Image: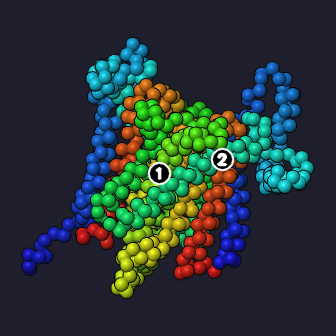
Amino acid sequence: MTDATLVKTPSQAREIWDQFRQHRGAMIGLAFLIFITLFVIIGPYLWDLDPTKSDIRNKNMRPFYIGMLFGEKWGWNHPLGSDNLGRDVLANLMYGGRISLAVGWTAMLLSLIIGTLVGVLAGYFKRLDGPLMRFTDLVLSLPLLPLLLVMMLLFRDALRAAFGPEFGIFLLIVTGIGITSWMNTARIVRGDVLTIKEREYVLAARSIGAPSRRIITRHLLPNVLSPIMVSATLGLATAIITESALSFLGLGFPSDFPTWGKLLFDSVDRMESFPERVIWPGLAISLTVLAVNYIGDGLRDALDPRIRGR
Amino acid sequence: MLTYTIRRLLLAIPTLLFIALVIFLLLELSPGDPMAQMPMSIPPEVKERMREALGLDQPWWVRFYLWLYQFFVVEPQYWIDGLFGTDLAEGAQRIISFQSKSPVFDIIAERIPQTLWVVGMSYVVGVLIALPIGIASAYYQYSWFDQIGTFISMVGFSVPTFFTGVLLIVVFSVNLGWFPSIYDTTLVVDSWASLGQQIKQMAMPVFVLALYNAAQISRFMRASMLDNLGQDYVRTARAKGMREKVVVLRHVLRNSMIPVVTVIALGVPQVFGGAIITEQVFKVNGLGQLLILAVQGNDIPMVMTLTFIFAVLIVLFNLIADVLYGLLDPRIRYD
């Protein structure tokens, strides 16, 4: 036995990770995403001010850097300043980020599940292909943002009554974004399933009598995982943007319930005197989305076997 | 090609009917009552008569049919009457807004110029910026120009338009005072000074939307150029001794434009949708703002008509994109 056979070939996950690490933007993006996730999850334990509690005596404080540079009212009790009711901006950013990220992740997962389901069914079962893809085309030609606005308005009160003001709106926004953004995933997954279905190993599995359910879960799904993951990153980015856009249009979460988009929307009226209140939540949204998009870019390169290892 | 176009046009009709039905049924579920704004002192039987006058007591399919009839028959008649001074409509009932009690299409006609100016201009500017950037970044792949271009386009479509807009207002109208932050619709352009004012107030919304559009289109342009630059015919053209400029700008560019043109066509209706947010930021009273107001005010005829117009745009531009693709690329013929 020679030494060459003893050299372990790196596992596939390892190879993907090695390729991913080559992409500088993706690594910075990943680092930022981890940072912002920790910031919103652990942050409130370290900075335990209630974001909705108003500290009216310390209202309209400026952030520390403006206070130090221009000598305006500031203090370490509100390092990033406070709003017109004396609510702490830093605490609001943390809690707002929690909701924005939670909405983003859940809506993305929902749209991924619907998209993968439709795509696999349409690609695998010939009888379903026509109707399902026709349906996908129809949904793609709906004006989605206007419909989302209408949905927000119509079902807001009913869901609020059924599940409480916060969870009801959360459900509404997540479902709304989920059912309006699955179409691209479905198309990509269908295309991939159509080609993979014709491979020999699927034929082999079928010839030993594997039922369709097992062929789909064991042979098809693992092989369409990479396009699904890439569209997951895109989905996360669009979900975060859509949620903040809805909040920005005043049709998202109820007032005094912070999300990044809501904080931005609430601060627009006073942005002439307090621009920092607009900039911080806006920066949080933009950087998170930018980070996620870069991760998607890196993931696409890492998961493409033609690029990998070059 | 012609038969394909006709077939697609015919197929668009059931699609649009289905979309209209979806929107109508969604609005039908609306718990909002257009009579909710009426004073409490109106007696119930009068209220009932007012509901009848609004047609709210009819079953939904009757109202759906009537809406379709008004949208596709009555409103075009009024439009032709307005153009040629004929009297086709003979005073037939038009689609009336619940909020303002005036015909929906009159309000839309008032709002369209602002949207078309801002949105249309921004799309043109965006395309004009995106094409050269895409071509240059592909030709000088991995150069510093490409790196910066790719980064800017990544930023351009990651940063939401409502943040870019607000940021520009903070910098250019609050701190520097160069541009007004609110779009003044009453401004009439009749002199050089007012033209300058118009350009000034359009600058920021156009820039915001143009950046967003340019970011997406330049990525497509770059990818498409890269696909073509490695092809055999490019090597042949160079081997024939053609100048580099001719090779890139004539041979490669023409072939690369095929998918980009369809992307540009497909993007037009999305721009109208995306403009809803930008119009809200800069207080442009265009179609997007009209839709938001109508949604908030439970103005069902207005929401229905506007949403359907957006849907018509989407279906129309999908069709245009497909037909263009067949026209531009002789390898793809649908017949």
Kindly identify which chain the residue marked by label 2 belongs to: B
Residue at disc 2, secondary structure: helix
Kindly identify which chain the residue marked by label 1 belongs to: B
Q: Position of residue A182 (x, y in %)?
A: 51, 56
Image-based side of A33 in relation to B12, left or right:
left
Q: Quadrant of residue A151?
A: top right
> Number of labelled discs?
2
Q: Name the residue under label 1.
A: B212
Q: Position of residue A38 (x, y in %)?
A: 30, 39
Q: Position of residue B317 (x, y in %)?
A: 62, 62
Spot the residue most to the bottom: B240
| Residue at x 32%, y 66% (from the top left corner) | B141
Q: In which quarter of the image is residue B303?
A: top right
Q: Is residue A207 visible?
A: yes
Image-based side of A45 in relation to B166, left or right:
left
Q: Mark 2 points at which residue?
A: B113
| Residue at x 52%, y 41% (from the top left corner) | B200
Mark 2 belongs to which amino acid? Pro
